[in-house]
Amino acid sequence: MVLDSGSASYRQPPDPDVFGAELQQQRRGGKKGSSPPPYNGLRIYPFLSPSLSLESDSSGSTPRTKLPPKSKCLRSRPVPPPLGVCPTFQNPCSWMRRSESICAINQRDRARGQIRSTTSLPHIPKAGAETSARGGRKSPCLLVALRPMNVEEERARFFQSSYTYNPQFEYEEPLPETVLEKYKGASGQFISQAIGIINAVLEKYGTYESFEATNGGKLLSKSQIWSIIRKYMQKEGCSGEVVVQLTEDLLSQAVMMVENSRPTLAINLSGARQNWLEGMLRHEIGTHYLRGVNNAHQPWHSLEGRKQYGLKPANPTEEGLASLHSVLFRKQPFLWRAALLYYTIFQAGRMSFCALFHDLERYVQDPGVRWEYCVRAKRGQADTSGPGCFSKDQVYLDGILRILRHRQTIDFPLLAALGKVSYEDVDHLKQYGALEKARIPHFMQDTERYMQQLDHIVATNCLSDEELEQLLPA
């Protein structure tokens, strides 16, 4: 694993890996040793040491924790605001694509309204202006381009105004109009479920801050983060494959991208909590990275291949699956963040920045946290005094609910093995997939336990199969 703390970086020798020599042989085109044991015809890379997760993520001989019985939910269904048109979340295929870092702005193509894949020009900002090897300034990935350059200055003005000033954001490079147009419309299809999930948390804990303090645990130091990451990489058998950076420049908790031709995981230091960090790693490494690796072996790894096989967009399945894995094995697997992002974006499409900030006070007391949610929903806009949003973050709850609706019929190990595909395409693709090198996350290998956890997520968030069936008819 390569560890990069942002302003300074260093390389650390990979941890011992029983498959390390075999991986090196595969990269050279050769073979060595015997293959790991198969699972339903798929090649598995089992974890290499007992789980050191601070969540209840036990495996192997450790006794399972019996799930609590489904209790009656007390939340009431509020009457939702008027619904908007549900946008389609399109996500063209690439080696590694996700909702945050899907694209990089291409200076040359900007006038034509085009965007370039992160894999061709990835970027994570560090102190000072960065330049490419040819002396030109690097074009930022979409995640970076969407973060206002003057966000700290506008934050100060906003707080000094007692929350009455609508920020005027400036951006390093204008986003293509096609991108802003595509994500300007907020959906209201799942607003009732979003509000219900939020209320379920508040009814149990009173405030989100109480929920976070009770369940998230303390913020981790850099050395603690490195230790947990290193051990997680061992469990997935990918030590030495991913660059890790710690940063404070993200609007999200973490992001998986490609930088300098290397898979790169950037983690926001402010979101690395004791009991939730492993969930973040299951989201980014166990889902996005491993599905990307599996996708590279498939005949549909290119855009042309996806067209040939008639594939649906990878999202919302990709982000929905990753979001479920974030809360998998938590004792209280509330889908708070996905629900609040969905709600915030829906309201941002109807409100100014100030109005949105005050509206969120009913759910989030901390003004700093509310600011971050509002910036995230309003990113891409210069003048935030009117309605408007960047709707991409609604993909999380959208994907979650669709997967939970069909969880009884989805072959989840196969969904991981086939790469960046929708759950709707699994049955169609299984006869064409290259599965001999497939890598399945360690937490998906016990299918029975995995399904129990999905049922637990449904019950905890006061959802029901009847509700999901009505919401999303087959």
Image (cartoon, rainbow, N blue to C red):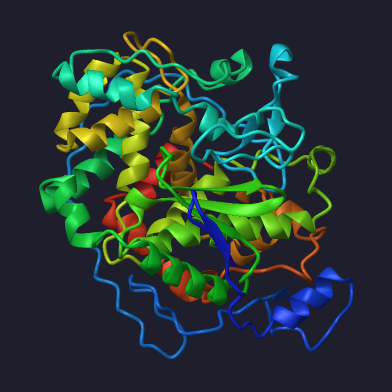
Instruction: Classify 339 as above or below 286.
Output: above
Residue at the (47%, 67%) spot, across then down: 229
Residue 287 position, x and y percent, is 56, 58
Closer to the camera, 122 or 421?
A: 122
Quadrant of the rendered image containing residue 460:
bottom left
Give the residue at the far bottom of this rendering. 61
* Quadrant, the N terminus: bottom right
Quadrant of the rendered image containing residue 110:
top right
Answer yes or no: is residue 374 visible: yes
Give the residue at the far left of this rendering. 206
Residue at the (43%, 79%) spot, across then down: 51
Answer yes or no: is residue 464 visible: no
Residue at the (73%, 42%) spot, across then down: 311
Instruction: Classify 361 as above or below 277.
Output: above
In-image side of 381 versus 456 (left or right): right
* Quadrant, the C terminus: top right
Closer to the camera, 265 or 194?
A: 265
Residue 57 position, x and y percent, is 39, 74
